[in-house]
């Protein structure tokens, strides 16, 4: 063995801080670590080169470690933080300060930690609510204007409050992991789960959570079940809530491959809206807010349903209709979410301008069932 | 349940004012034949509280087409007070069957389908729409449009009451 080199026979364990492999031969034992993408000097507490993912994290110093959150996160390969809590890293740009909260559920008396992450692949903000005792629930944020990539806040009486947005629940960690396996575990940037799993109509829920007003929208489970799951035994305190109809679902795995999921509309689903769409009418329609909190206009849509079937609804008595598909709306930047209504196929289209909505619903075609009803 | 904001006579006056504003005599006369003296009833408003009901007034009914035209200050009412609904359907329904004017409401219904006021237009991309046929009933316009689409499936053809 060369002078100055050390060898510990039998110990065999080469990994140190943050679970990374020590480069003991360069600066002495435990003083340098290989993070794959960068080299970390443990004495300086810094990486020796800029973050290769700096374009992905413009809000971080290029020399930051673990997203500047060494309590909650580890650093993943020297490129980005990875939360040890939910294996989601967070965007301090959007969830800084008081928004990144411990929230207290008054009903259950339990504290939940809300942690969010902006996923650049989908442009959505994903949020995990964690009670620190192994209970985690997963949501993504939907602003009432349909934007899903940012959290908007305002301060009222010293409290930072989400501004007209709701959290839309998707599957549990285990279910998601089962579908996406290692992709989730690799952390942010790999997380591409897309969900608009049905909506239940819940009026603004604000009572249980300090400082953050949440409109919890969830899948076809009962509202009380969702609330119980999300924030402990919240049930009756929030009053009666109408549970909405649930459509079909599509999730997209890391590869981009569509994975059918129960409860969400497929891209192929036909969308029908009564009447002749004009910019004037669609401007008014697009401003409406469904009780679920979704801002947008009403349509009829269901997986596998034909125009003939959708127009049998008494909600489409018009002599002409506009027709498009869920996929076309999504391609234009919008979303179609099954929502409550007098028709089981009622859905709300959000995220489209009046002009774009008019374009997609034009030309109108004659209604095959004008005013006939079911 | 909401209070009545108007009585029947007041609603009747609102209807009369709307009818007077219709410039096309054919449309005005046809609408006049299905008008009735306003009758109040309640409908469920699906965009508010659970089981919330508001007063509506039935102002026109066409037994042939099954069309009922209603008026309401509530629901979509403040902006679009004229509703096209199924009589047996106890809800306000979608915003797409509520209109700013009674004339629009009537023209969106099947009650106007027999009037020879319908045209078939070729939709222009960068140019104005071109009238291909006019003064048709709605059924005739549908047939003409269908034939045009078979002959030239790449074009868009519209039915309108211009």
Image: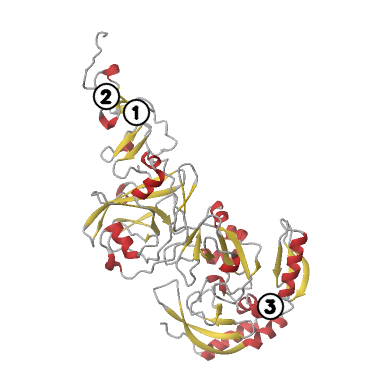
Which dot marks residue A14? 2
Q: Is residue B111 above or below residue A169?
A: below
Q: Is the residue under label 3 in contact with that under label 1 (CB below 8 Å)?
A: no
The Cα–Cα distance between marks 2 and 3, rounded to whole angstroms, is 82 Å
The Cα–Cα distance between marks 1 and 3, rounded to whole angstroms, is 73 Å
Q: In this view, does A16 lie to the left or right of A369?
A: left
Which residue does the numbered mark 1 point to in the structure image?
A35
User: Which residue appears at 41% of the width and 49% of the height?
Assistant: A125
Which residue does the numbered mark 3 point to in the structure image?
B113
Residue A354 quadrant: bottom right
Have a look at marks 1 and 3 and say if they share a chain. Answer: no
The Cα–Cα distance between marks 2 and 1, rounded to whole angstroms, is 13 Å
Chain ID, mark 2: A
Have a look at marks 2 and 3 and say if they share a chain. Answer: no
Q: Is residue A91 left or right of residue A121?
A: left
Quadrant of the rendering where the N terminus of chain B is positioned: bottom left
Quadrant of the rendering where the C terminus of chain B is positioned: bottom right
The residue carrying pointer 3 sits among few (fewer than 14), some (14 to 19) or many (20 or more) residues within 10 Å by Cα, namely many
Out of B21 and A200, give the one closest to the viewer.
Answer: A200
The residue carrying pointer 2 sits among few (fewer than 14), some (14 to 19) or many (20 or more) residues within 10 Å by Cα, namely few
Percent coordinates x, y for residue B41 in the rendering: 48, 86
């Amino acid at each position: 063995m060369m002078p100055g080199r050390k060898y510990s026979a039998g110990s065999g364990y080469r990994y140190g801080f943050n679970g990374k492999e020590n480069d003991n031969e360069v600066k002495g034992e435990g003083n340098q670590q290989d993070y794959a993408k960068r080299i970390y000097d443990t004495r300086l507490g810094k990486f020796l080169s800029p973050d290769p993912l700096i374009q992905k994290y413009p809000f971080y110093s290029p020399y930051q470690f673990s997203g500047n959150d060494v309590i909650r996160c580890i650093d993943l390969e020297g490129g980005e933080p990875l939360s040890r809590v939910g294996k989601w890293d967070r965007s301090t740009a959007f969830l800084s300060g008081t928004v990144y909260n411990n929230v207290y559920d008054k009903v259950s008396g339990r504290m939940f930690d809300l942690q969010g992450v902006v996923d650049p692949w989908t442009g959505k903000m994903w949020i995990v609510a964690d009670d620190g005792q192994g209970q985690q629930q997963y949501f993504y944020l939907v602003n009432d204007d349909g934007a899903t990539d940012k959290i908007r806040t305002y301060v009222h009486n010293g409290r930072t409050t989400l501004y007209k947005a709701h959290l839309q629940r998707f599957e549990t960690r285990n279910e998601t992991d089962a579908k996406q396996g290692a992709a989730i575990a690799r952390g942010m940037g790999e997380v591409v789960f897309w969900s608009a799993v049905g909506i239940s109509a819940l009026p603004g829920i604000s009572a249980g959570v300090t400082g953050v007003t949440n409109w919890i929208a969830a899948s076809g489970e009962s509202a009380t079940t969702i609330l119980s799951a999300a924030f402990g035994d919240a049930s009756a305190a929030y009053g009666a809530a109408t549970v909405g109809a649930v459509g079909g679902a599509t999730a997209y795995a890391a590869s981009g491959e569509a994975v059918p999921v129960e409860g969400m509309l497929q891209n192929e689903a036909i969308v029908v809206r009564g009447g002749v769409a004009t910019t004037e009418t669609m401007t008014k329609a697009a401003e409406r807010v469904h009780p679920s909190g979704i801002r947008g206009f009403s349509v009829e849509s269901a997986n596998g349903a034909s125009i003939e079937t959708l127009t049998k609804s008494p909600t489409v008595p018009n002599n002409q209709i506009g027709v498009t598909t869920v996929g076309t709306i999504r391609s234009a930047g919008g979303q179609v979410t099954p929502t409550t209504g007098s028709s089981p196929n009622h859905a709300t289209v959000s995220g489209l301008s009046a002009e774009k909505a008019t374009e997609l619903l034009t030309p109108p075609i004659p209604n095959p069932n004008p005013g006939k009803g079911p | 349940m909401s209070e009545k904001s108007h009585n029947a006579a007041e609603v009747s006056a609102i209807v009369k004012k709307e009818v007077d504003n219709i410039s096309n005599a054919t449309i005005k006369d046809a609408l006049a034949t299905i008008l009735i003296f306003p009758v109040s009833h309640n409908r469920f408003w699906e965009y508010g509280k659970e089981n919330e009901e508001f007063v509506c007034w039935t102002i026109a009914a066409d037994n042939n087409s099954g069309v009922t035209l209603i008026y309401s200050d509530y629901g979509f009412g403040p902006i679009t007070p004229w509703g096209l609904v199924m009589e047996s359907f106890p809800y306000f329904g979608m915003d797409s069957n509520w209109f700013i004017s009674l004339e629009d409401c009537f023209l969106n219904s099947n009650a106007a389908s027999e009037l020879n006021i319908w045209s078939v237009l070729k939709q222009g991309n960068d140019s104005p729409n071109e009238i291909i046929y006019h003064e048709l009933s709605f059924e005739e316009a549908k047939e003409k449009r269908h034939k045009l689409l078979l002959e030239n499936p790449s074009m868009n053809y519209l039915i309108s009451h211009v």
